[in-house]
Image (cartoon, rainbow, N blue to C red):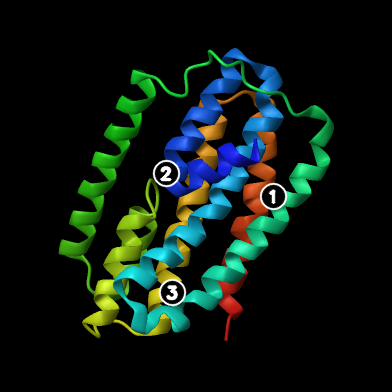
Amino acid sequence: TVASGLLGGFISSTAASITFSRMTRDAPRLASAASLMILVASTVVFARVVGEIAAVARDHLWELAPPLLAMMAGMAVIAAVLRMRVSQDLGVPAPDDPPSDLRSAVIFGALYALVLVCVAFARRHFDSSGMYLVAAISGLTDMDAITLSTTQLLKQQRIDIETGWRMIIIGALSNLVFKGAIAATMGNRQLSRHVGVYLGLGIIGGACMIAFWP
């Protein structure tokens, strides 16, 4: 279960959340496992983000990494708490369960295209004060775009460090909200409850970081 979440987070935590959520429709017993896999994937994505920053903007790594690693640590604690609470109720998917299907892929692709259009519109019609809105829109389905865009803006000295890491965190919180919506619409009631509560804790923690991080 944990390994599936780790791999999903390194590849695409959003696509993994869609796959894990849909599993619970046909196999309600997997709700606890699916919720844990979604939490683990949502934690690992911060390690991927830090790795991307190290690859494309090494000079800014040590300035951007601390709040991102703090957010990852908080999500790891939340995932560990969920792991302890559902440890006796973890089902294992049958070997012949398909990892994904065409319908999920089409839905994800359509949502991703819609977000790209919204991001292009926001960048065209909003000035620098609208960058946080762009980050929130861009982060809905994918963390890579907002991470790479932000690092490029930093390298071009168009934004400062504080604005940069806050944009990435806002994108991450938006992504958590989107995953909660995925669980609510594609998963069963138990998955929706677990994911909603534990991702909600992560969202509250991230909002506090944005407001109070020095």
Tell me which residue sits at (64%, 51%) in the image. Answer: 200
Helix, strand or loop under label 1 = helix
Query: Residue visible at 62% across and 23% down?
Result: 188
Q: Mark 3: which amino acid?
A: Trp
Task: Write down the quadrant of residue 57 in the picture.
Answer: bottom left
In which quarter of the view is residue 91 placed? top right
Where is residue 52? Give x, y as percent: 37, 64
Farthest left residue in view: 124
* Mark 1 surroundings within 10 Å by alpha-carbon count, few (fewer than 14), some (14 through 19), many (20 or more): many
For residue 24, say whether it is visible: yes
Tell how many labels. Answer: 3
* Upstream in sequence: badge 1 or badge 3: 1
Spatial CA distance of label 1 from label 3 is 23 Å
Q: Quadrant of the C terminus?
A: bottom right
Say whether marks 1 and 2 touch (CB < 8 Å). Answer: no
For mark 2, give the secondary structure. helix
Any mark on residue 143, and which? Answer: none
Task: Give residue 181's position: percent from left, percent from top.
Answer: 51, 37
Residue 185 visible to the viewer: no
Q: Which residue is mark 2?
A: 12
Of circles 3 and 2, which is in front? Answer: 2
**Residue 165, label in figure:** 3
Residue 14 in the image, given as x and y percentages of width and height: 44, 41
In the rendered structure, which disc, 1 or 2, sits on the residue that comes first in sequence? 2
Instruction: Say which amino acid is labelled 2.
Output: Ser
Task: List the residue tagged with mark 1.
Answer: 79
Query: Marks 3 and 2, how far apart in space?
Result: 21 Å
Element marked by disc 3: helix
